[in-house]
Structure formats: structure tokens, C-alpha cells
Image: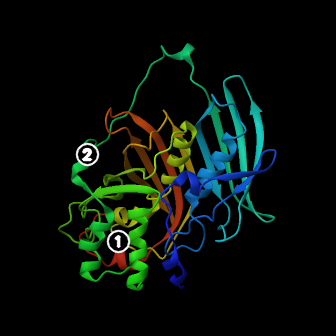
Amino acid sequence: MSYRHLAKIQYRSSLEQALALTQVKRDVFKNVEPLFVPLGARGIFGGSLIAQALLAASKTVPENFYPHSLQSYFLAAGKPGQDVEYRVERLRDGKNFLSRETRAYQGDKIIFIEVVSFTHDRKDLEGQLQHSMKPRFEGLKELDQFVHPTKLAETKLFSQGINPFQSSKELLQNLFERFTYGVGEYRVRDNYFDDVTDPKHADFNKTPDEIDTDYFVKLRTPSEHKIFQYVAFAYFSDSVMLSTIWKFQKLKIFSPKLSVSLDHTIHFHTTPDLNKWVYTTLEHPRSIHGRKLMNGYAYDPIGGDLIATIQQEGLVITDESAKAKRQGSKL
């Protein structure tokens, strides 16, 4: 596959502009800007579909209603360069909960579906029991120990001659620019790219469900709109999860041969604020028949409250024979 065309991408710094929608008719919307295609991907970024479907649905509910959960399914790859039309169906309007279904089409072909439930603040329920899970391991307030992924890639990957796409320096520079000038800012631990197949690695003798990985993310260009904080969270929630499978499965980085999202769920427990850093931990509880299940927990790094819970399942095809040859690893 050729990635030469991606060298000319100019990354936007404003996610709000990148995900803007225009109304076609009542409850029907389409994208204004061309949708992002990740380096190495055949279709448009799934996070764009999740986020724009949520944005479209939110345009059909009263301003005091916000999403508390969404469930989405990827039905077919979105073709780069083609417009996506979002058709919203008003499933139910109740007093406290509203339900919407958004279907994404390219031409006559449906490529994505998402159901969103909206609610509003219930002052009559403020006295009910409240509980918020805390992270399983330290790291919540350790932003100074996390580093820019571009700088880390330069020192841990490319300085060692590791080039995942066998690409030109121009394309690699383009990949760097995504994390330097793109819509989101990321911070990862300085051991993020360490070789997990090395018997000396701290996770080498752990099972996948015993391993955690974490990161920070925020908007590069802040947004003043409350609803867009939910939209931005939905976008970023699809940007890291499946790409960390190699860490849990103890494979060489970039070794999966195929990685596609199948479904994606978010439960919003409170309003996210992506104008500030959000801390997320990831877990990999199950892998079977090529389907990898990932759980994510997003926290407010200041107060420590759980902001949202994410669950994603993807089809990730790896070189299992190479993994089976390794000795001493507990899988």
C-alpha cells in the first residue's frame, strides 16, 4: 500500500472546525471538511464518525440535554475523500431521557450506526449515593513524568532504525506533525515504546489482564461549547485503544497485520473538559477469535473522579506464530 499522498496532509489544530457539520434538511447533516485518514489506514478515522454522529444527534435535542451514553457499530470502512451524511432518527422524547439513532451514509451505503441517550441534570436526585472508582495504579497527578510521543518516538524508535511503514523521511515527518500540530495534545510514559518482548521488561511475565497502560490528552485549540467537550472526548476515545494491543499481547510494536474497530461504547459520568488534560488508563480483559476487547477509564487528573468509561472491540490480526515461539512469557 502507498502512503505517499499522506505526506501532503496539513493537520488542523482546531477539532471543532475539523468536525463541523452543515444541515442538509431536518435531522440530516453532512461533514464540511474532509475527514481524517490515519497513516497506514485504508478508511477514514473511526473517531470522526463517532464524534460527528454524536454532534448530529445533539443538534436534535434541547440545549439542556447532554449525552450520558452511546453505543456505535462500524459497518463498513469509510472511503477517504467522500462526504458522509448523518441521518438522525428521533427514537423517543421523554421527560428526563431522549434517545437518538444516527446512521452514517456515503451515497446509498450505510457505514456506521450510533445510538445515543441524552439526559439532563436531576436536582431531585442529588441526594442519591455517589461513588467514583479510582485508578488501579499511581499516575493520576504525574503529568511531569509523561512525555511528548514525538520526542519519544525519535529517541526510542527511529534512532534505532525502527520504521513501521518503511516510509520516506517526508512521511515520518508528517506522522510527527500530527502529534505536534494536530487537533490533540498527547503525553505518554517514557517507557511507552519499550520492547515488551524483552524478558527484562516489567510486563514480560504478566498476563494481558494484569497489564495497564495510560496517557494524557487534551484539545490543542480549546472549545467554549459544553456539548463539544462530549464530542471531543468521543473523538479522542478512539485514537489510542486498539493501537496499544501490541503492549498487552507482548508483540513487537506495529506488528498487527490488521486492526479495525467493530464497536465502541462510552458512558459519560460527568461533563468532560478537554480544554484541560484528561488522564486515561487502558485494560485488555479478553481476546478471542481475533476480537480484542479494550476497556478505558478517563479521569479528572485534579480531583481523581471518573469522567467516562469506554469499551471498544476490534478485529486485530497478529502474527501468533511469532508470539508462540517466545519462551518464558506467561500468556
Residue 263 visible in the displayed image: no
Residue 258: x percent and y percent? 51, 73
Badge 2 marks a residue whose secondary structure is loop
Closer to us: 159 or 100: 159
Residue for badge 2: 139
Residue 270: x percent and y percent? 48, 32
Graded by Cα atoms within 10 Å as few (under 14), some (14 to 19) or many (20 or more), the crowding at tag 1 reads many
Residue 118: x percent and y percent? 64, 34
> Could you say which quadrant of the image residue 141 lies in?
top left
Say what amino acid the circle numbered 2 marks. Gly
Residue 48 visible in the displayed image: yes
Q: Earlier in the sequence, mark 1 or mark 2?
A: 2
Placement of 289 over or under 167, stated as above or below: above
The circle drawn on residue 251 is 1
Placement of 282 over or under 124, stated as above or below: below
Closer to us: 151 or 207: 151
Residue at horizontal 67 percent and vertical 52 percent from the top = 21
Front disc: 1 or 2: 2
Residue 190: x percent and y percent? 23, 61
Closer to us: 312 or 44: 44
Residue at horizontal 65 percent and vertical 41 percent from the top = 116
